[in-house]
Image: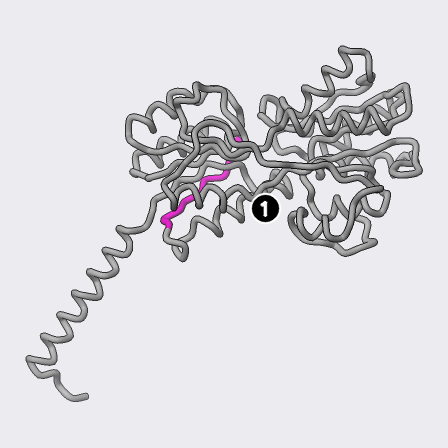
């Protein structure tokens, strides 16, 4: 190999320095975003949400984005404090529990970190965050209960399967059911939960227990699609008919494509949308510098066996599509 001349060596050093300088500048220009979220294992909804956040807030898009995923509220708060210490520009939070966040949010405010809530609201003064892009969980509950009251024969005897207790989703989706019971419009004959992970297995146990206890019920109101799936597995094992022409009506939440195909096939009856794709809208706010103040609700709908189309499933569904006519049991 030929030896480098002094001029050649100097040129190589200059190029290297310039290249390194470019790298440093490029890195410094990245917008630092800390994301505190729940784990993807929680549900198909959460899996889509986590992936969406990672895809949008990537280096390719000009972000130094880091995401922490845990269903433990204390661990979430510790992660948020870590991002604040790291000097992030933006802190995005989907809280496991709606309460207890005041100190963290005020720390971010003092540090000049802009906080944007997504997916779930937090019980705090609105001055503690910039904006919240969320689903209106109370509206989702109203949509679901309206469908129940209009489509389930009286007397309406309902099995309620809640998500993580104390989460914004559980509180909002439960409220309409509890209100309808208080008004004498339906009876809650079994009230259980899928736990902190919105577990299919725990939901199945809730329905199994209701069957063993000889509870008479004609609708299952499961607060996500995975739990609806577990509930239906219990019905299948017990030989209880369900769906369009069955004894027990089934309604879930989240719009996983497997669930929408089940609705289309009449295996389930209805599903309520909860849109996980908040990252692109938040990214627009950040890029424009125009972050709205307060709560911004996403528009969401309910689809039923009688109304659903392939176009609906393609446009609104999340995660893998098993295909038309395929039932996920």
- Total labels: the figure holds 1
Front residue of 9 and 32 = 32
Front residue of 43 and 72 = 43
Up the image or down, 252 lies above or below 55; here it is above
Give the magenta part as a residue range. Answer: 63-71
| Extreme-bottom residue of the structure | 2
- Specify the principal SS of the magenta part: strand
What residue lies at 30% left-to-right and 34% top-to-bottom?
85
**Quarter of the figure with residue 228:** top right
Up the image or down, 103 lies above or below 9; here it is above
Is-magenta flag for residue 173? no
Q: Is residue 177 left or right of residue 101?
A: right
Residue 97, percent across and down?
A: 53, 25
**Coloring basis for residues:** one colour
- The residue to which callout 1 is attached is 48
| Circle 1 SS class | helix
What residue lies at 50% left-to-right and 37% top-to-bottom?
37
Q: Quadrant of the C terminus?
A: top right
What residue lies at 80% left-to-right and 39% top-to-bottom?
304
Up the image or down, 221 lies above or below 273; here it is above
| Extreme-left residue of the structure | 6
Residue 34, percent across and down?
A: 39, 40
Residue 174, percent across and down?
A: 68, 22
Q: Is residue 189 left or right of residue 138?
A: right
Q: Quadrant of the N terminus?
A: bottom left
């Amino acid at each position: 190999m030929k030896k480098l001349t002094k001029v050649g060596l100097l040129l190589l050093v200059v190029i290297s320095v310039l290249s390194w300088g470019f790298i440093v500048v490029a890195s410094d220009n990245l917008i630092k975003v800390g994301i505190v979220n729940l784990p993807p294992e929680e549900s198909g909804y959460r899996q889509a949400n986590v992936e969406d956040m990672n895809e949008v807030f990537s280096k390719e898009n000009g972000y130094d984005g880091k995401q922490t995923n845990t269903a433990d509220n204390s661990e979430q708060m510790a992660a948020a404090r870590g991002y604040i210490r790291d000097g992030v520009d933006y802190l995005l939070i989907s809280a496991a529990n709606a309460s207890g966040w005041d100190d963290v949010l005020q720390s971010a405010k003092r540090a000049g970190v802009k906080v944007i809530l997504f997916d779930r609201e937090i019980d705090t003064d609105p001055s503690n965050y910039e904006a919240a892009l969320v689903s209106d969980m109370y509206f989702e509950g109203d949509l679901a209960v309206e469908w129940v009251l209009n489509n389930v024969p009286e007397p309406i005897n309902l099995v309620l399967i809640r998500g993580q207790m104390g989460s914004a989703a559980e509180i909002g989706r439960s409220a309409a059911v509890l209100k309808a019971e208080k008004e004498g419009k339906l009876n809650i004959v079994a009230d259980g939960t899928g736990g902190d992970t919105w577990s299919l297995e725990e939901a199945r146990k809730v329905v199994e227990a209701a069957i063993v206890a000889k509870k008479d019920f004609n609708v299952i109101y499961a607060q996500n699609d995975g739990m609806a799936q577990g509930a239906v597995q219990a019905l299948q094992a017990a030989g209880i008919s369900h769906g369009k022409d069955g004894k027990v009506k089934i309604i879930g939440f989240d719009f996983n494509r497997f669930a929408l195909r089940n609705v289309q096939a009449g295996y389930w009856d209805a599903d309520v949308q909860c849109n996980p794709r908040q990252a692109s809208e938040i990214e627009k706010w950040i890029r424009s510098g125009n972050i709205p103040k307060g709560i911004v609700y996403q528009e969401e709908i309910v689809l039923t066996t009688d109304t659903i189309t392939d176009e609906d499933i393609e446009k609104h569904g999340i995660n893998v599509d098993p295909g038309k006519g395929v039932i996920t049991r």
